[in-house]
Image: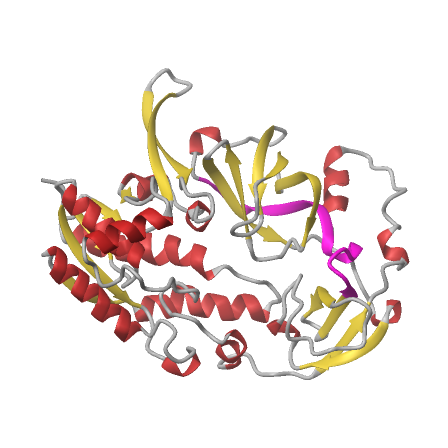
Amino acid sequence: MKRVVVGLSGGVDSSVAAYLLKEQGYEVIGLFMKNWHDDTVTISNECPWLEDSNDALMVAEKLGIPYQTVDLSEQYKEKIVDYMFKEYENGRTPNPDVLCNREIKFDVFMKIALELGADYVATGHYCRKAEEEVVLEDGTTQTVYKLMAGVDPSKDQSYFLCQLSQEQLAKALFPIGELYKSKVREIAAEADLITAEKKDSQGLCFIGKVRLPEFLQQQLKPKDGFIYEIPKEAGIFSASEAQSYANLEEELHAEAKAFQYSPEMGKKVGDHYGAHYFTTGQRKGLNVGGTAEPLFVIATDVANNIIYTGQGNQHPGLFHKTLFVQEHEIHWIREDLELQPGETMQIKARIRYRQPLQEATLYKMNSGMYVRFDELQSAITEGQFVSWHIGEELIGSGVIAKVV
């Protein structure tokens, strides 16, 4: 009998994942990850870890499976929280959920599970895994593991797993990937699981709902600065249109290049308490009124502690057609499909969770990867992940870099 360790989070998805695996005849062990000790920055009663661990324990008892808690808070602080602080300090916007899956659930946690004699690790993610025998150039065959979108389009979570490797996927199971959320709740109710009606947590991976400014202020000190508004008609937005380029790479570089603003281009419209707390595309938290349309952050200058804004969600400062991923931050789940310098690939891509897939082309260069979209994209954000897909399969991803 194959042994599976399930990451029980105390939510309905992982509860049903454990239930389904037990029904399928696996030997199931439930493991709860405690990743956080500091309750001062979590919003009261929103996913406190103690309640979650109790719910996970009750689910395990109901299913008659062994259960234990593992404290990974030290590794979580080092690999996720410290990284987040560093990224925000440098003016980038990280995605802790993607990192949590790569560094914690499918690395630290997976190693613990394998030490317990597990054949697989299972989670309550809405995605699927497939296998395919691929013939390599030398004529040999190799089993390739594919990360597929979840069947429920409104819940597909494959994006959060975009940094997994073949080794990690080989040992992973996603029991609810074929189901719609409504069906998962139905199964939980029929099995009389305590989590059947429990609300989904919206917070950081296994921390809970966090007040992000307060969370960041633990380490990043507030710093007063100015907010400037850049008009839509500013010359910077038309300057590049008439240019000609020596080659394709030069053209792609120009398309991906961040607009370089200065205070003289606009007018001062307000004050802020730290450019490192803000991100491109952000509308809330600026506390500036009196404009015809809402203000959106179009850029942050952390070095000079300045926030640049523009009116309305169609402001030209929000839009780019191309983004860049540095060579060392390109990640292929499907290593057999990896592009070599000079090669291109038609794909679909997304730059944030839940964004509908966009038509795009990958251009591999010696310096890294350009992703050129068929249509302009709003708020391409440095530090976030871009994922690329063929059909329902997520084949690779990378961290969006700033091009200057």
Tell me how the rendering is colored.
secondary structure
The image shows residue 255 at horizontal and vertical percentages of 75, 45
Q: Give the residues drawn in magenta, as a range.
A: 310-332
Which quadrant of the rendered structure holds the N terminus? top left
Q: Is residue 363 left or right of residue 144?
A: right
For the stretch drawn in magenta, what is the main secondary structure? strand
Is residue 117 within the magenta segment?
no
The image shows residue 128 at horizontal and vertical percentages of 35, 39
Name the residue at 77% across, 57% down. 317
Is residue 311 within the magenta segment?
yes
Q: In this view, does 268 lie above or below 312?
A: below
Name the residue at 13% across, 55% down. 63
Q: Image quadrant of residue 56?
A: bottom left
Name the residue at 36% across, 15% down. 139
In the picture as drawn, the residue positioned furthest to the top comes out as 139
Q: Nearer the viewer, residue 119 or 19?
A: 19
